[in-house]
Image (spheres, grey):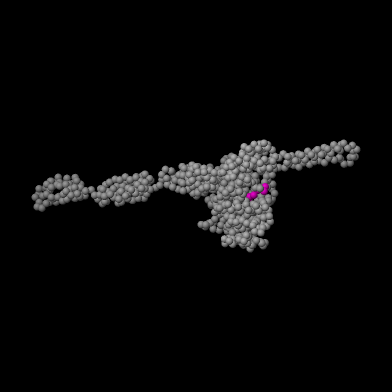
Amino acid sequence: MGAPVTFPGREQEVDVRAERGTARSDVRARPTTAPDPLLGRVLDRRYRITERIARGGMASVYIAHDLRLDRTVAVKVMHPGMGDDEQFAGRFVREARAAARLSHPNVVAVYDQGEDEGAVFLAMEYVPGHTLRDTIAAHSPMPPAKALGYLEPVLGALAAAHRAGLVHRDVKPENVLISEDAHSAGGRIKVADFGLARAVTAETQHTSTGVLIGTVSYIAPELVIEGKADARADVYSAGVLLYELLTGRKPHTGETPIQVAYKHVHDDVPPPSRSVPGIPAYVDALVARATARDRDLRPADAGVLLHQVRRVANALAAGIDDDPELTADLALPVHTTEVEDTEVEDTESYDAPSPVEPTTALPTRLPSIPPDRTVERLAAPSGRPRSRRRWPRLVALVLGALLLVALAGGGWWLLLGRYEHTPGVVGLTRADAVSRLHHAGLEVRSRAAYSDTVPKGQVITSDPERGERILEGHPVTITVSRGVEQYAVPKLAGKSVDDAEDALVKIKMDVPAPVERWSETVPAGQVIKSKPKAGTVLRPGHTVTLVVSKGRQPIKVGDWVHHNAAKAKAALHKRGLKVELQQAYADDVPKGQVISQSPEDASTTLHRGDTVTLLVSRGPHLVTVPSVLGHGVDAATDELKGKGFEVEVRHYTPYFGLRFVMSQESRGEKIPYGSTVVIYIS
């Protein structure tokens, strides 16, 4: 129904959505030859068609100019006659409405939908560039980190779709568009063609056409067996896509689509390292988890797989070759449930895989029909004379009639009579539904699902649905509403970032990059709190931000020497540090200023509550000079030195040789400790 909108200047033959049980067998680029009546036409007085770039079984894709907004768009136009089929037209319109609900930078936007003189069309974002198929052909096998770089935006787009209740159903390289500026600052990788996406509601859980829809190389096993798909089918296809990026080849191949589908059901996707040695075990485990044949073992949706991909990408970025813990987290259980066997009929030929693989339709599993029984004709042998007695002939006719009635009755019973009609139970409580089904002789299996519209405890759907035929004693599966899907934010304080993110992903919350803060009580790497706080009840898809500890905040000491001690103490207290003051005399440092500090290095960092020691100047040490007049020279010298002074002895003129102090300098004055005092003797 749609095609990647790329490769301006040439036309692509694109995959056909098998809505009537048919499929195209090739997808190849070829020049446009036949004239197209739409070229040059203006649709809805707005979109001027300028060039056809792709053609599929149901629609063609054109480059057009939006006359109203003066921009280039891609317009997908349903082929003539298709719009007359109400089922096809309805699906085409539903595609527009479903895709228009998505608003994500990695999803090709749908702008408009309309009809103009029988031409039913969609107007979409035009993405010039190439597809991921071209990248795989040119650059695979590629390193795991590069492969995950291509897969991340794809999963981001699918996660947005899954949060909106949509399943893509046809994830493949051809539907991943890489714009021409994809390697520049504004480069974009976008997922296109949500034409097969169906709203996942309680009322629609399977295809309505009785055929499988999807590309056979990427199709999930449950689509082959049951024709049913949920978000986990997209997860499987994304896992196969990752395998192809890593190895440059598809995991399953065969001569026909049936053989490939059979392998998806019965064979595991092999580890990528088997084809490309050196791929880490945790990358193998990621591929195995995404492509588990049992869908219950896969990530619940693309959002969960995206979280796992980011964990693996972080390990690769850190250069970790072997991470047993991560490998164990991603590894599948040792014993897995085998997927139910299925029989499918090879109804079409399948050439070797082409550069662009088409979407393929496969017949779903049909119940076996009893072999035909023939009635032998009752007739007399040729040549025997006709009996004159009529009784044998009448008896033969009666017996023949009875036999025909018995055979007709047996055939009716085999084809119709042994079946019951499933009673309607939608809207009943679980107990009432079980009672009604048991009364009809049917077994009951139940499962729970969330619903925004059906009250908790009431039946949303039944399989088979009301009025459908079912063998007596066979089970009817009812889906019981669990009410509106909402979850309380768990208590995350004290958990590691990975554990906290895992807990939020499990309840389908959107988890952006954590906000980091310093904490004096919570160790680095642990969650301080969440926004909104624990216990807040939210719907899936809401954003929950983690506030994560960076550990204790380092505090720079700084240089306080020759600064005022009181101001230094106040500044350090404001930073959360303790201050111890010590005092000392200093002749060259004014009183009240810092002489030295510990730690000495100004660039040293401490933590809140640590101590800085400041040595504060008391100024010069002043001492009063005692009077030593009349003292003997030795006694005077000893006394002055005892006070901390140096002594200089000079002779008094005239000198009498008595050696007594006759005069002295600075007597009674306060002078610095250690100064020299001059005494005169006679």
Residue at 45%, 44% in the rendered image: 528
Span shown in magenta = 209-215
Q: Nearer the viewer, residue 634 or 112?
A: 112
Residue at 55%, 53% in the rendered image: 104
Q: Is residue 309 above or below residue 393?
A: below
Residue at 57%, 42% in the rendered image: 483
**Which x, y percent locates residue 607?**
38, 46
Q: Main secondary structure of the magenta part?
A: loop
Q: Quadrant of residue 418?
A: top right
**Which x, y percent locates residue 445?**
63, 39
> In the image, is 388 to the left or to the right of 431?
right
Whether residue 239 is visible to the viewer of this picture, yes or no, is: no
Q: Nearer the viewer, residue 37 or 436?
A: 436
Q: Where's the N terminus, which quadrant?
A: bottom right
Q: Nearer the viewer, residue 657 or 341?
A: 341
Whether residue 554 is visible to the viewer of this picture, yes or no, is: yes
Q: Residue furthest bottom?
A: 40
**Residue 471 magenta-highlighted:** no
